[in-house]
């Protein structure tokens, strides 16, 4: 059973950097793509970016200048760093495994999500 | 933020069939496959349908997906109280070079 668990600070001040980690169990991060998705309150889902276990990344153009994804195969974790946060970054952040095949792309396992609130 | 359009709500009585639509464009649904996810508060989101109409192992065959042109649909037959949740469609978008999501549909079992 593949399980993902997000962890992070919960509350962050405006202009600061929030770092989130996703710990994977039941599967190795090696060989797969891993992704972050967020959902602001009352709004829809937004894909943030994904990272391959080798470290190759693909970021949402709307967030590219403020995010960095990284992966630690020794800890079976991957992480998100979001810089210069504002109230608009308040959201539930989900981590997920991203399957990419020749002609299809989908998230097959998700974490329960972690709330990140940006407030002074 | 959401590129794909879904009705905000849908409802039915137990045993009925409910259909949720997902409308996109040529850069996403029109040229890529569609996936459907179930969101239930307090639980990890779940993949229901991938590649337009493929059910992962463990997903009941009451759930089915289809796609035509730039639109897709999720059908839930034999509606059950446990199906009361929010459903999102998603597809790869060639303009974004990444996945985009629908606006979400809340299903109520009357």
Image (cartoon, helix red, strand yellow):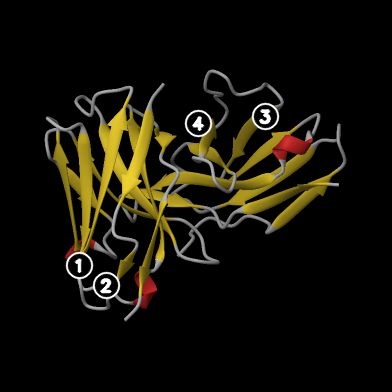
> Is A54 drawn above or below residue A85 in the view shown?
above
Q: How far, Cα to Cα, is label 4 from label 1? A: 34 Å
Q: How far, Cα to Cα, is label 2 from label 1? A: 6 Å
Question: Residue at (16%, 33%) from the top-left corner?
Answer: A75
Badges 3 and 4, same chain: yes
Q: How far, Cα to Cα, is label 4 from label 2? A: 33 Å
**Do labels 4 and 2 touch, CB within 8 Å?**
no
Q: Quadrant of residue A98?
A: top left
Between B66 and A38, the one lying in front of the other is A38
- Asked if residue B27 shows in the view, the reply is no
Q: How far, Cα to Cα, is label 2 from label 3? A: 39 Å
**Do labels 2 and 3 touch, CB within 8 Å?**
no
**Which residue is most to the bottom?**
A120
Badges 2 and 1, same chain: yes
Q: How far, Cα to Cα, is label 3 from label 4? A: 11 Å
> Is A29 drawn above or below residue B18 in the view shown?
above
**Circle 3 sits on which residue?**
B63
Q: Chain of mark 1?
A: A
Q: Chain of mark 3?
A: B
Badges 3 and 1, same chain: no
**Circle 1 sits on which residue?**
A17
Sequence-first disc among 2 and 1 = 1
| Relative to B95, A17 lies left or right | left
**Circle 4 sits on which residue?**
B50
**Do labels 2 and 1 touch, CB within 8 Å?**
yes
Name the secondary structure under disc 1.
loop
Question: Residue at (31%, 49%) from the top-left corner?
Answer: A7
> Is A77 drawn above or below residue A12 in the view shown?
above
Between A67 and A21, the one lying in front of the other is A21
Quadrant containing the N terminus of chain A is top left
**Circle 2 sits on which residue?**
A85
């Amino acid at each position: 059973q593949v399980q993902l668990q997000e962890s992070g600070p919960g509350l962050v001040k405006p202009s600061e950097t929030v770092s989130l980690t996703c710990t994977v169990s039941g599967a190795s991060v090696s060989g797969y793509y891993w992704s972050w998705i967020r959902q602001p309150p009352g709004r829809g889902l937004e894909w943030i970016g994904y990272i391959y276990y080798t470290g190759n990344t693909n970021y949402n153009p709307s967030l590219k200048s403020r995010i960095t994804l990284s992966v630690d195969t020794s800890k079976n974790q991957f992480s998100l760093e979001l810089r210069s946060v504002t109230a608009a970054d308040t959201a539930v952040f989900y981590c997920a495994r991203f399957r990419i095949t020749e002609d299809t792309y989908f998230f097959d396992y998700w974490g329960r999500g972690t709330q990140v609130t940006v407030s002074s | 933020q959401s590129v794909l359009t879904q009705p905000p709500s849908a409802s039915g009585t137990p045993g009925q069939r409910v259909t949720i639509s997902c409308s996109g464009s040529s850069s996403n649904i029109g040229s890529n496959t569609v996936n459907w996810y179930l969101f239930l508060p307090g639980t990890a989101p779940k993949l229901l349908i991938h590649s337009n109409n493929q059910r992962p192992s463990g997903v009941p065959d009451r759930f089915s997906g289809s796609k035509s042109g730039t639109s897709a649909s999720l059908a839930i037959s034999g509606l059950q109280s446990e199906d009361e949740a929010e459903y999102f469609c998603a597809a790869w978008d060639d303009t974004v070079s990444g996945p985009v999501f629908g606006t979400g549909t809340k299903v109520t079992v009357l």
